[in-house]
Image: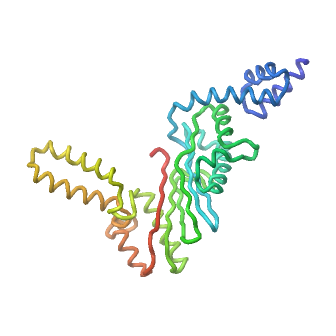
Amino acid sequence: MSKESAFEQVKELRKLTGAGFKDCNIAIKDSNGDIEKAIEILRVKGISKASKKMTRDAKEGVIIINDSNNYKSILEINCETDFVAKNEEFINFVKEIGNLNAINKANIDNLKKSKMKNNLSVEENLVNFISKIGEKITIGRTRYFDSTKALNISYLHGTIKDNLGKLGVIVSLETNGKVEKINEFGKKLAMHVAASNPLSIDKDSIDKDVLSKEELLINEELKSTGKSDEIIKKISLGKINKFKEDNGLLTQQWVMDPKKKVLEIIKELNISDLKIKDFYRIKIGE
């Protein structure tokens, strides 16, 4: 093989894989000029490089919300730096994965096995992309909302581009009321959830493990006051009840009017069958 021919193959391999000149040059030599074999060699090397990067923290990234008349889905893709999160190639990569995630109804295992446009799986492309950009990239939290029996409304904060941002919320409502009126309330409710970060729909549905940890922290704090056990028990109960009210969506103070609670706002809408069915919130870095 002439030097000119080998150089052209290295250029082609770099174009196809995004790998560096040195790695491509070695791969071309090791594959005796076979581009397909060279790509495979780089992929194997990429897996090795990617595995080292996976021990690092990935606290940046984007939230992508996909929707249609039948569904809404939300997905978190993490990377290490905000620079990469705003990179056009990364954004396009996330958009394609977001579409596949919606098709797979937020099933991560099925998503990772899904084929992308280049006929490689999401998992394979993830490894290759990690090797190319030099940062850890992970598929994070996700949810899928069926819209056939519910009105699902989304809100995106810190928008980077189109349907990508830094904080995303989907709220799911059940009602036979006027769609226009419900949409307006749903958008405000999604904004409220984004700002207030409730733990559950109502105060009595908060995870018991969360409450136990909070109660333990409260009791530890109160022990240092020197008060009697009976007084500590009463104060602790009051603080736990306050914690539950502050973190149950229905009993939270409405962000747009803190003098009222979410439950009161719903009553004022005068839609008898309106019900908050579900919600989901993802913020990068939390």
Relative placement, left or right, of 219 versus 19 is: left
Question: What residue is rendered at 57% in x and 40% in y?
Answer: 138
Question: Which of the 4 image quarters holds residue 42?
Answer: top right
Q: Is residue 49 above or below residue 186?
A: above
Can you give x and y, in whole percent of width and height, for residue 205 in the image?
A: 36, 61
Can you give x and y, in whole percent of width and height, for residue 47 in the image?
A: 65, 30
Q: Using the image as rendered, state which of residue 6 and residue 212 is in the foreground.
A: 212
Residue 252 visible within the image: no
Can you give x and y, in whole percent of width and height, for residue 170 in the image?
A: 51, 61
Q: Quadrant of the N terminus?
A: top right
Question: What residue is rendered at 32% in x and 54% in y?
Answer: 208
Q: Is residue 284 above or below residue 36?
A: below
Relative placement, left or right, of 38 versus 68 is: right
Question: Which of the 4 image quarters holds residue 17?
Answer: top right
Question: What residue is rendered at 10% in x and 53% in y?
Answer: 230
Residue 274 visible within the image: yes
Question: What residue is rendered at 68% in x and 39% in y?
Answer: 125
Q: How is the image coloured?
A: rainbow
